[in-house]
């Protein structure tokens, strides 16, 4: 089911949205990785996933799994149920298990879709996930999805979109500091990592 959805998404984005992509070779060929992308539209997860040549697991709000049919589909394509921050105990455990198994995960540090298409502040919960894993973080920026399918649009419009994958970030120094840091400092580190990720996303140019 994942492969079918991946191929269909690539076709739709190529023909309807005239997608342009660059930097997908920054995704590690082996081992775990985290894709950290800005979030402007419902189109962002399939756009990023379709341009990533390795399978990834998606995060989805727990409430979406309450529908038996839709919930079954989400599980079949590897979605992980989480709260809005992605840092609930159950969700965090599942995410870390996927990464430990060598899988890829896509996260949206802003936590929710942008209301105006501009980048938002990253949430500390993403920093928690990153620092508790050993996975490199690939910053990703999507362009044009707000205009194509933003909050004010009920139907996707055929606007050009693009996605850029940046060089991986490793955060090894922050992980080492966290091992002996106080609780207040650990919370600061979570937010600092989230801020650094969003800065890296902001620096990515349109393809």
Image: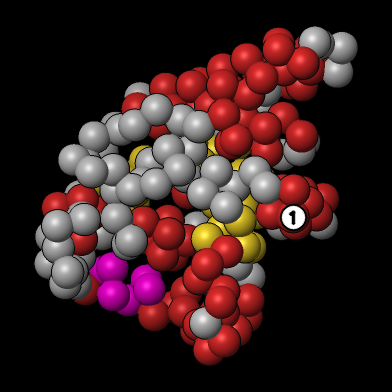
Secondary structure under the numbered disc 1 in the rendered image:
helix
Residue drawn 39% across and 46% down? Answer: 112
Q: In terms of depth relative to the viewer, which is nearer, 72 or 4?
A: 72
Residue 158 is left or right of residue 200, and the answer is left
Closer to the camera, 4 or 66?
Answer: 66
How far across and how far down the image is residue 19, in percent?
A: 25, 59
Q: Is residue 90 above or below residue 193?
A: below
Image quadrant assignment for residue 78? bottom right
Instruction: Give the answer, above or below, for where 41 lies relative to 122.
Output: below
Query: Quick check: 24 left or right of 154?
Result: right
Classify 7 as above or below 51.
below
Q: How many marks?
A: 1
13 in magenta: yes
Q: 10 Å neighbourhood of mark 1: few (<14), some, or many (≥20)?
A: few
Task: Work out whether 94 lies above or below 108.
Answer: below
Q: Position of residue 26 (x, y in %)?
A: 54, 41
In the image, what residue occupies the spot 56% across and 77% down? Answer: 66
Q: Name the quadrant containing residue 205.
A: top left
Mostly what secondary structure, the magenta segment? helix
Q: Is residue 193 magenta?
A: no
For label 1, the residue is: 90
Query: Which residue is pictured at 51% across the width and 49% down the height?
Result: 84
What percent of the width, then of the height, locates residue 168?
Answer: 58, 33
Of the pair 68 and 96, the residue shown nearer to us: 68
Q: Which residues are magenta?
A: 9-14
Residue shown at 32%/62% (left/top)?
43
Viewport quadrant of the N terminus = bottom right
């Amino acid at each position: 089911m994942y492969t079918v959805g991946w191929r269909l998404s690539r076709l739709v984005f190529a023909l309807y949205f005239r997608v342009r992509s660059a930097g997908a070779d920054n995704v590690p060929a082996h081992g775990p990785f985290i894709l950290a992308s800005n979030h402007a539209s419902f189109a962002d997860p399939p756009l990023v996933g379709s341009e990533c040549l390795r399978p990834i697991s998606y995060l989805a709000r727990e409430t979406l799994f309450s529908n038996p049919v839709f919930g079954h589909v989400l599980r079949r394509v590897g979605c992980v149920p989480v709260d809005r921050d992605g840092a609930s105990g159950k969700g965090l455990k599942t995410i870390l298990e996927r990464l430990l198994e060598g899988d890829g995960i896509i996260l949206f540090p802003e936590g929710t879709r942008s209301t105006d298409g501009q980048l938002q502040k990253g949430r500390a919960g993403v920093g928690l996930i990153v620092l508790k894993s050993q996975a490199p973080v690939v910053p990703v920026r999507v362009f044009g999805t707000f205009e194509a399918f933003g909050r004010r649009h009920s139907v996707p419009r055929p606007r050009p979109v693009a996605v850029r994958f940046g060089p991986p970030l490793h955060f090894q120094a922050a992980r080492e500091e966290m091992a002996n840091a106080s609780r207040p400092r650990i919370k600061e580190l979570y937010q600092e990592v989230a801020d650094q990720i969003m800065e890296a996303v902001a620096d990515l140019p349109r393809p």
